[in-house]
Amino acid sequence: MAAAERPYRLPEDELRLWRATAAGAMRLLRARHADYAGELDAGLRTLTPVPLAGGSSAGHSGSAAEMFGGVTLSRPLHAHDLAETLVHEMQHSKLAAVMHLVDLLAEPGTQEPGARYYAPWRDDPRPLYGLLHGTYAFMSVARFWSREAAFLSDPAERHRAHVRCARWREAASETKEAMLADPSALTGTGRRFVAAMGKALAELRTVPLPASAVREARSQAEDHRARWAERNRAAATGS
């Protein structure tokens, strides 16, 4: 076999880091988030490492509707971050499986056309398919950090968890409203599905958080929206 055709293998030291971080993430989830751990035990099949893009320090992860339980991701630095990523990506896999069986969108199967929605977690306008997926995933991310904060003794780490909970519960609530505001976008089943998410988010929003964390999350949201508007205005005008 030519060298270019050989499958890539992680160096042994990096493989040990992956294994240790993955084991730490699953210990954390089984101890503190039994429901999410159960989903992963039942559904997670493969983790495929990918390099950071262009030397970026920002992590990356993804999953495909056609490969249930498969996650591609750059190497996380901490077990907490991997736990969050696994929770996030399993929600995408679950929703993709549901959408193979049930039509939630009025125009099922059209993922890219009509990309017009603002998503607080993306730099580009999103189609309805992407908005629904992101809302469902980030609702669980917010719930993960809401629970996790109670276990963190370090004040800085606890504050970070509170900020992430506030940021993503508000983001998911915003996009849920955007989907329900378009009466032609969802099927009847889809509207009931999004309304059920709304009830879960309303309950999550009753969880008390420190005012400082809420302010920081709101500032992050405002900064993101401003950058998004500027970037997409420039793209639209070609400047």
Image (cartoon, rainbow, N blue to C red):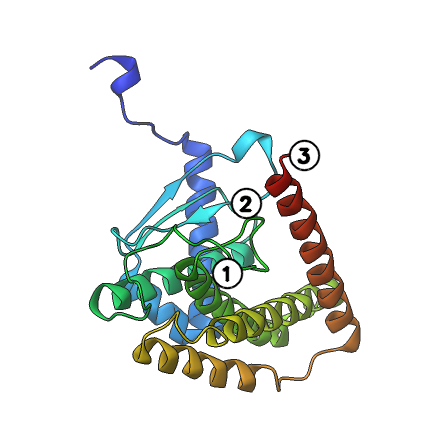
Image point (50%, 75%), residue name = 181
N-terminal-most mark, 2 or 1:
2
Report crowding for label 1: few under 14, some 14 to 19, many 20 or more residues within 10 A (C-alpha): some
| Mark-to-mark CA distance, 3 and 1 | 37 Å
Residue ID for mark 3: 239
Quarter of the rendering containing residue 40: bottom left
Q: Nearer the viewer, residue 149 or 116?
A: 116
Mark 3: secondary structure: loop
Image point (52%, 47%), residue name = 76
Point out the image quarter for the N terminus: top left
Q: Nearer the viewer, residue 99 or 52?
A: 99
Point out the image quarter for the C terminus: top right
Q: Nearer the viewer, mark 3 or mark 1?
A: 3
N-terminal-most mark, 3 or 1:
1
Residue ID for mark 2: 59
Instruction: Check disc 2 and give the amino acid type.
Output: Gly
Q: Nearer the viewer, mark 3 or mark 2?
A: 3
Residue 34 at x, y percent in the picture: 41, 75
Residue 210 at x, y percent in the picture: 75, 77
